[in-house]
Image (cartoon, rainbow, N blue to C red):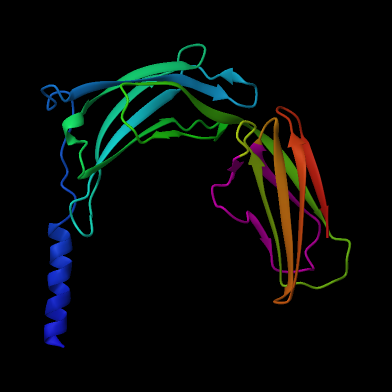
Amino acid sequence: MKKVRAFLSLIVLSILLCSCKKEKINKADCRGAGCKTMYLNGKVLDASLNEGIRNIEVKAHFYQYKSNCFICIGTPVETTAKTKTDNLGNFKMSIIVDTNLLNGNYHYIVDVYAAVNADYIEGNDSSFYNFAENITNITLRKYKKTKLYISLKRELADTFKTFDVAHYFYDNTNGKIIDPTNQQGDFYKMYSPNIADTNIIVFTGANAKTVIYWRKFISNTNVLYRTDSIFCSANIINNYTIKY
């Protein structure tokens, strides 16, 4: 047993020693022909109105992962650039990178994303895996928040163990599912069939197709599912009723 513990301790120690080496890569450190500037430009778009969002912060992270060990633990090396959009929602910025490090021992990715804004639901960020000196026409979409009032109306006399409700909406551009709760699951769960009528207020994306999903769990062999959709507009009261 002592030999087994010693062996396991040796493995843990080896992993720790083999963790990712963190190197600060920035303009001051980057020298020589391998020092390149990556230029990025694009637009932060209000996807609900199809217009640019002004004066919002945009960041780009250039990650370099060193993978010359069996199990790599640690924080990826990164270089960061940031800027703000102009009055039309356009942005441009640059990152200095050391391309000498882009060899077989390194993996690389550039993430470009816009800052969180309380008036919007996040739509997408953009990731790039191949080095290019110019990455253009990046589009970062956000959806205007709008309220959706869901009314639960009890009409049946059946019994159940749980009743769940969830919702999500579709990105108008690429059909990607966006979960406004960021929970990838139910935002409301009922455990008793004797609860009176209930009203739920949630946020969803304006001018986008919202899917409402509910499930009545009666037993392990009897589960009822229903889905429906509603197009929610901005600056109005959007209502949906579930009769169960």
Q: Position of residue 152 (x, y in %)?
A: 79, 54
Q: Nearer the viewer, residue 188 or 226?
A: 226
Q: Position of residue 132 (x, y in %)?
A: 32, 25
Specify whether residue 112 is painted magenta. Answer: no
Question: Would you place residue 9 above or below residue 234 in this image?
Answer: below
Judge left or right: residue 199 versus residue 10. Answer: right
Q: Position of residue 166 (x, y in %)?
A: 67, 53
Judge left or right: residue 194 versus residue 211. Answer: right
Specify whether residue 177 is painted magenta. Answer: yes
Q: Quadrant of the N terminus?
A: bottom left
Q: Residue at x 55, y 35 (%)?
A: 123
**The image quarter in which residue 188 lies:** bottom right
For the record, the magenta segment spans 176-204
Q: Can residue 119 be seen at all in this image of the molecule?
A: no
Q: Residue at x 62, y 21 (%)?
A: 50
Q: Quadrant of the C terminus?
A: bottom right
Q: Nearer the viewer, residue 151 or 171?
A: 171
Question: Would you place residue 200 above or below residue 219 in this image?
Answer: above
